[in-house]
Image (cartoon, helix red, strand yellow):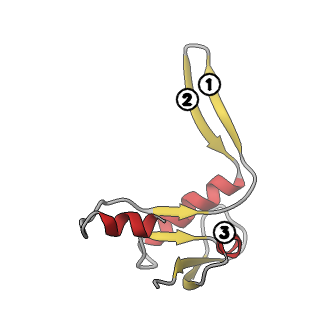
Amino acid sequence: SVIEARAALAGGDTGFRTALHHGVLAYGNMGASRRLDFTAIGASVNLAARLLSAASAAGADDVVSREFAQLTGEPHLVAATAALKGIGDAVEILTRVEP
């Protein structure tokens, strides 16, 4: 897991944060023939980006959505509930329970 990988770096702060969500998206090369960028777009991508933006306010570096947490089968804690820009209802921001 990301948390275990971070711990393997001998406690050094990598400055790396994650926000994970599960949902539908579109991905591929976007743009014109002279300039293509590989990207992902969609409501799921937007939610993951908004979760990452809200992670610091929730006091966490690694957060997941409720949908993602349910897929893992691992325990998670609600770090915060927030209204996220572009997302209709307030969203729970979850963090993994450390073993």
Callout in the foreground (3, 2): 3
Tell me the amino acid under the disc marked 3.
Phe
Q: Residue at x 55, y 29 (%)?
A: 37
Q: Position of residue 32 (x, y in %)?
A: 62, 18
Q: Identify the residue position indicated by label 1 in the image.
A: 31
**The quadrant where residue 8 appears:** bottom left
Circles 2 and 1 in contact, beta carbons < 8 Å = yes
Tell me the amino acid under the disc marked 1.
Gly
The residue closer to the viewer here, 85 or 27, is 27
Q: Earlier in the sequence, mark 3 or mark 2?
A: 2
Q: Residue at x 68, y 65 (%)?
A: 87
**Would residue 18 appear left or right of 7 to someone viewing this image?**
right
Q: Position of residue 57 (x, y in %)?
A: 43, 76
Q: Earlier in the sequence, mark 3 or mark 1?
A: 1
Q: Identify the residue position indicated by label 2 in the image.
A: 37
The alpha-carbon separation of the residues under discs 3 and 1 comes to 30 Å
